[in-house]
Image (cartoon, helix red, strand yellow):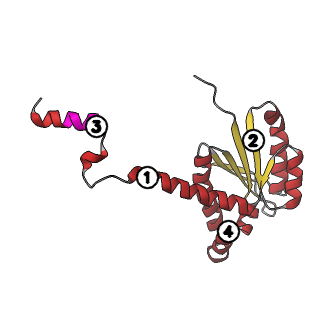
Amino acid sequence: MPPSLPRAVLLVDGYNIIGAWSCLKRTRDTAGLEAARCELIEALTSYTAFQGYETQIVFDAQYQNTCSNREIITELLSVHYTEFGQTADTYIEKVCASLRSSLAQSLISRMIVATSDRAQQLMVLGYGAEWMSAQQLCYEVQASVCRVRQKYKQRKQSNTRFLANSIDAKARQRLAQLRMGL
């Protein structure tokens, strides 16, 4: 069995993305921050699965007197709430610093940080990470949704409305034999 390819790690500055995507801003302003967080998590769940990225969405708890918390959403997606006084930026920088050696040893193929914070972008580049703007992430998420729909649509389409045309030739032949009593 060939060794699996090294994984790519995507770190997402959650509140930065919520503030940059118009659909999430609208949700935040009408339904609240929790609803916007859920919408972002839902969007990134599909994207993460499609891309195969190990994704961490990071939310500040900077102004809340809470402990850090980690929620595992799927095998590839987790949500991290920082501890009191810690920003998402410092959390992401620490993760990038800890993953730098894994990147150098090819244990991970890529380290990507999604944020539109210019200072954060420059900082993570120093750790060997790539950065993706909030708008680029939005575009990528929408494009992956379109690709998934297209793939599903192609699989779903059939030549005719008969069930026999949607099964393979060998199964059709076996069914014909059963009908003939063979």
Separation of residues labelled 1 and 4 (CA atoms) = 37 Å
Separation of residues labelled 4 and 3 (CA atoms) = 53 Å
Residue 8: numbered disc = none
Side of 166 where 50 appears, left or right: right
**Magenta segment, which residues?**
168-175
Separation of residues labelled 2 and 1 (CA atoms) = 31 Å
- Image height check: is 137 above or below 93? below
Separation of residues labelled 3 and 2 (CA atoms) = 43 Å
Separation of residues labelled 4 and 2 (CA atoms) = 30 Å
Mark 4 lies on a secondary structure that is helix
Disc 2: CA contacts within 10 A as few (<14), some (14-19) or many (>=20) = many
- Image height check: is 169 above or below 141? above
Give residue 149's position: percent from left, percent from top: 49, 56
Three-letter amino acid code at disc 2? Answer: Arg
Disc 1: CA contacts within 10 A as few (<14), some (14-19) or many (>=20) = few
Q: Quadrant of residue 97?
A: top right
Residue marked by disc 1: 154
Disc 4: CA contacts within 10 A as few (<14), some (14-19) or many (>=20) = some
Q: Is residue 132 magenta?
A: no
1 or 4: tag closer to the N-terminus: 4
Camera-nearest residue between 156 and 118: 156
Residue marked by disc 3: 169
Disc 3: CA contacts within 10 A as few (<14), some (14-19) or many (>=20) = few
Q: Give the residue at x 60% y 42%.
A: 75
Residue marked by disc 2: 110
Mark 2 lies on a secondary structure that is strand
Three-letter amino acid code at disc 4? Answer: Leu
